[in-house]
Image: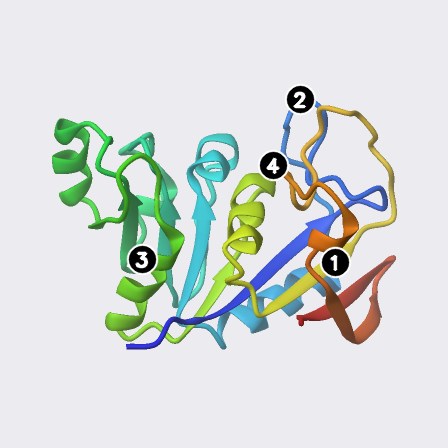
Amino acid sequence: MSKPFVLINSAITADGKLSTREKMQIEISSKEDFERVKRLREKFDAIMVGVGTVLADNPSLKGNIIRVVADSGGKTPLNSKVLNGSNRAIIALSERAPRDKRVALEEKAEVLVCGEEKVDLNLLLEKLGSLGISKLMVEGGGTLNWSFFAEELVDQLYTYIGNFVVGGKRAPTLVDGEGVREKEEAFELELSDMQRLGEGVLLKWDVK
Protein backbone atom coordinates (compact mmCIF):
# COMPACT_ATOMS: atom_id res chain seq x y z
CA MET A 1 0.00 0.00 0.00
CA SER A 2 1.37 3.44 -0.87
CA LYS A 3 2.07 6.11 1.70
CA PRO A 4 -0.44 8.94 2.13
CA PHE A 5 -0.09 12.31 0.46
CA VAL A 6 1.21 14.66 3.17
CA LEU A 7 0.29 18.32 3.63
CA ILE A 8 1.73 20.37 6.48
CA ASN A 9 -0.73 23.12 7.36
CA SER A 10 0.28 25.79 9.85
CA ALA A 11 -0.34 29.32 11.06
CA ILE A 12 2.67 31.43 12.00
CA THR A 13 3.29 35.00 13.09
CA ALA A 14 4.89 37.53 10.77
CA ASP A 15 8.25 36.56 12.29
CA GLY A 16 7.68 32.84 11.78
CA LYS A 17 6.70 31.80 15.31
CA LEU A 18 4.08 29.22 16.29
CA SER A 19 3.62 30.56 19.83
CA THR A 20 5.26 32.77 22.45
CA ARG A 21 8.59 32.17 24.18
CA GLU A 22 6.62 30.48 27.01
CA LYS A 23 5.12 28.16 24.37
CA MET A 24 1.66 29.51 25.16
CA GLN A 25 -0.95 28.94 22.47
CA ILE A 26 -1.92 32.12 20.66
CA GLU A 27 -4.60 32.77 18.07
CA ILE A 28 -2.83 33.58 14.82
CA SER A 29 -5.39 32.72 12.15
CA SER A 30 -8.04 35.17 11.04
CA LYS A 31 -11.72 34.23 10.92
CA GLU A 32 -11.31 33.61 7.20
CA ASP A 33 -8.39 31.27 7.78
CA PHE A 34 -10.27 29.28 10.42
CA GLU A 35 -13.01 28.73 7.84
CA ARG A 36 -10.41 27.68 5.26
CA VAL A 37 -8.92 25.09 7.61
CA LYS A 38 -12.37 23.74 8.42
CA ARG A 39 -13.08 23.21 4.72
CA LEU A 40 -9.60 21.82 4.09
CA ARG A 41 -9.94 19.13 6.76
CA GLU A 42 -12.99 17.78 4.95
CA LYS A 43 -10.73 16.84 2.03
CA PHE A 44 -8.37 14.70 4.14
CA ASP A 45 -8.67 11.26 5.68
CA ALA A 46 -6.62 11.97 8.79
CA ILE A 47 -4.97 14.76 10.73
CA MET A 48 -1.75 14.33 12.72
CA VAL A 49 -0.17 16.22 15.59
CA GLY A 50 2.80 15.47 17.81
CA VAL A 51 2.54 14.73 21.50
CA GLY A 52 4.07 18.14 22.23
CA THR A 53 1.01 19.80 20.71
CA VAL A 54 -1.28 17.52 22.72
CA LEU A 55 0.51 18.40 25.97
CA ALA A 56 0.69 22.14 25.26
CA ASP A 57 -2.68 22.81 23.62
CA ASN A 58 -4.90 19.75 24.22
CA PRO A 59 -6.55 20.12 20.79
CA SER A 60 -9.80 18.34 20.00
CA LEU A 61 -9.07 18.24 16.23
CA LYS A 62 -12.69 18.73 15.32
CA GLY A 63 -14.19 17.44 12.11
CA ASN A 64 -15.16 14.12 10.61
CA ILE A 65 -11.57 12.98 10.38
CA ILE A 66 -9.26 10.34 11.86
CA ARG A 67 -6.95 11.80 14.51
CA VAL A 68 -3.33 10.62 14.72
CA VAL A 69 -0.81 11.43 17.44
CA ALA A 70 2.93 10.77 17.07
CA ASP A 71 4.01 9.95 20.63
CA SER A 72 7.30 8.07 20.94
CA GLY A 73 7.29 7.84 24.74
CA GLY A 74 3.60 7.29 25.42
CA LYS A 75 3.07 10.67 27.10
CA THR A 76 -0.43 11.38 25.78
CA PRO A 77 -2.72 11.93 28.82
CA LEU A 78 -5.66 9.55 28.92
CA ASN A 79 -8.05 12.48 29.40
CA SER A 80 -6.81 14.30 26.29
CA LYS A 81 -9.53 15.68 24.04
CA VAL A 82 -7.98 13.88 21.08
CA LEU A 83 -8.77 10.55 22.79
CA ASN A 84 -12.25 11.40 23.95
CA GLY A 85 -14.10 12.54 20.84
CA SER A 86 -16.44 10.52 18.68
CA ASN A 87 -13.99 10.06 15.83
CA ARG A 88 -11.38 7.35 15.47
CA ALA A 89 -8.04 8.04 17.14
CA ILE A 90 -4.66 6.46 16.39
CA ILE A 91 -1.65 6.76 18.70
CA ALA A 92 1.76 5.99 17.20
CA LEU A 93 4.26 4.81 19.83
CA SER A 94 7.81 3.54 19.81
CA GLU A 95 8.88 0.35 21.55
CA ARG A 96 10.29 2.34 24.47
CA ALA A 97 6.85 3.54 25.55
CA PRO A 98 5.92 1.98 28.93
CA ARG A 99 3.89 -1.18 28.49
CA ASP A 100 1.28 -0.19 31.07
CA LYS A 101 0.68 3.12 29.28
CA ARG A 102 0.41 1.31 25.96
CA VAL A 103 -2.26 -0.98 27.41
CA ALA A 104 -4.14 2.00 28.84
CA LEU A 105 -4.02 3.85 25.53
CA GLU A 106 -5.35 0.79 23.73
CA GLU A 107 -8.57 1.25 25.72
CA LYS A 108 -8.98 4.68 24.17
CA ALA A 109 -7.48 4.42 20.69
CA GLU A 110 -5.87 2.23 18.09
CA VAL A 111 -2.17 1.91 18.94
CA LEU A 112 0.51 1.47 16.27
CA VAL A 113 4.06 0.67 17.36
CA CYS A 114 6.50 2.14 14.84
CA GLY A 115 10.19 2.14 15.67
CA GLU A 116 12.41 1.35 18.64
CA GLU A 117 13.42 4.63 20.31
CA LYS A 118 11.22 7.07 18.40
CA VAL A 119 8.32 6.90 15.98
CA ASP A 120 9.57 5.90 12.53
CA LEU A 121 7.52 8.17 10.29
CA ASN A 122 8.18 6.12 7.16
CA LEU A 123 6.86 3.01 8.87
CA LEU A 124 3.94 4.92 10.35
CA LEU A 125 2.90 6.26 6.95
CA GLU A 126 3.10 2.77 5.49
CA LYS A 127 0.79 1.52 8.24
CA LEU A 128 -1.60 4.43 7.76
CA GLY A 129 -1.66 3.69 4.04
CA SER A 130 -2.54 0.07 4.77
CA LEU A 131 -5.48 1.35 6.83
CA GLY A 132 -6.85 3.17 3.79
CA ILE A 133 -5.56 6.63 4.66
CA SER A 134 -4.47 8.29 1.41
CA LYS A 135 -4.38 11.97 2.42
CA LEU A 136 -2.82 13.14 5.69
CA MET A 137 -2.83 16.66 7.07
CA VAL A 138 -0.08 17.43 9.58
CA GLU A 139 -0.69 20.25 12.06
CA GLY A 140 2.48 19.71 14.02
CA GLY A 141 4.87 21.80 16.00
CA GLY A 142 8.37 22.64 14.84
CA THR A 143 9.83 19.30 15.89
CA LEU A 144 7.31 17.11 14.09
CA ASN A 145 7.41 19.35 11.02
CA TRP A 146 11.19 19.01 10.88
CA SER A 147 10.96 15.23 11.18
CA PHE A 148 8.64 15.09 8.17
CA PHE A 149 10.97 17.28 6.11
CA ALA A 150 14.08 15.40 7.24
CA GLU A 151 12.52 12.13 6.04
CA GLU A 152 11.43 13.79 2.76
CA LEU A 153 7.80 12.92 3.38
CA VAL A 154 6.20 16.32 2.71
CA ASP A 155 4.29 16.93 -0.53
CA GLN A 156 2.82 20.37 0.19
CA LEU A 157 3.21 23.12 2.78
CA TYR A 158 0.48 25.67 3.54
CA THR A 159 1.44 28.57 5.79
CA TYR A 160 -0.94 31.26 6.99
CA ILE A 161 1.10 34.27 8.12
CA GLY A 162 -0.56 36.45 10.74
CA ASN A 163 -0.16 40.21 11.10
CA PHE A 164 1.87 40.47 14.32
CA VAL A 165 5.32 39.79 15.74
CA VAL A 166 6.09 38.00 19.02
CA GLY A 167 9.87 37.56 18.91
CA GLY A 168 11.83 35.41 21.33
CA LYS A 169 14.72 33.07 20.57
CA ARG A 170 12.98 30.33 22.60
CA ALA A 171 9.68 30.68 20.77
CA PRO A 172 9.04 27.66 18.53
CA THR A 173 9.14 28.24 14.79
CA LEU A 174 7.42 26.53 11.88
CA VAL A 175 10.30 24.06 11.50
CA ASP A 176 12.75 23.50 14.35
CA GLY A 177 14.65 20.27 14.95
CA GLU A 178 18.26 19.77 13.95
CA GLY A 179 18.08 21.79 10.75
CA VAL A 180 20.46 21.71 7.80
CA ARG A 181 24.13 22.69 7.84
CA GLU A 182 24.20 24.60 4.55
CA LYS A 183 21.83 25.90 1.89
CA GLU A 184 22.58 23.01 -0.47
CA GLU A 185 20.85 20.70 2.02
CA ALA A 186 17.73 22.87 2.25
CA PHE A 187 14.33 21.64 1.07
CA GLU A 188 13.31 23.60 -2.00
CA LEU A 189 9.74 24.78 -2.44
CA GLU A 190 7.73 26.15 -5.35
CA LEU A 191 5.06 28.74 -4.64
CA SER A 192 1.79 27.53 -6.18
CA ASP A 193 -0.68 30.09 -4.81
CA MET A 194 -1.07 33.00 -2.42
CA GLN A 195 -4.09 34.88 -1.14
CA ARG A 196 -5.03 37.44 1.46
CA LEU A 197 -7.28 36.13 4.24
CA GLY A 198 -8.36 38.86 6.65
CA GLU A 199 -5.26 40.68 7.88
CA GLY A 200 -2.93 37.81 6.99
CA VAL A 201 -1.75 35.97 3.91
CA LEU A 202 -1.87 32.30 2.92
CA LEU A 203 1.07 30.83 1.01
CA LYS A 204 0.76 27.45 -0.70
CA TRP A 205 3.99 25.64 -1.50
CA ASP A 206 4.76 22.45 -3.41
CA VAL A 207 7.83 20.58 -2.22
CA LYS A 208 10.19 19.92 -5.13
Q: At which x and y percent is residue 65? A: 39, 66
Looking at marks 3 and 4 on the same chain, the residue that comes earlier in the sequence is marked by: 3
Q: Position of residue 165 (x, y in %)?
A: 86, 37
Residue 160: mark in rendering: 1
Task: Tell me which numbered mark, 1 or 2, is placed earlier along the sequence.
Answer: 2
The Cα–Cα distance between marks 2 and 4, rounded to whole angstroms, is 21 Å
User: Which sits earlier in the primary sequence, circle 1 or circle 4?
Assistant: 1
* The quarter of the displayed image where residue 154 is located: bottom right
Q: How far apart are marks 2 and 3 (CA)?
A: 33 Å
Q: Which residue is drawn at 75% across and 55% down?
A: 184
Disc 4 is placed on an element classified as: loop
Which mark, residue 170?
none
List the residue tagged with mark 4. Answer: 178
Query: Can you identify the residue that label 3 sits on?
Result: 123
Foreground label between 2 and 3 = 3
Contact between marks 2 and 4 (CB within 8 A): the answer is no
Disc 3 to disc 1: CB gap under 8 Å:
no
- Decide if residue 122 is in sight here: yes
Mark 3: amino acid: Leu
Q: What element carries label 1?
A: strand
Q: Quadrant of residue 115?
A: top left
Depth check: give the residue in front, 142 or 185: 185
Question: What residue would you read off at disc 2?
Answer: 22
Q: Which amino acid does label 2 sit on?
A: Glu
Please tell me which residue is depicted at 31% across the width and 71% down the height of the picture.
129
Relative to 179, residue 151 above or below? below
**What secondary structure is found at the residue carrying circle 3?**
helix
10 Å crowding of disc 3: few (<14), some (14-19), many (20+): some
Q: Would residue 207 be found to the left or right of residue 91 on screen?
A: right
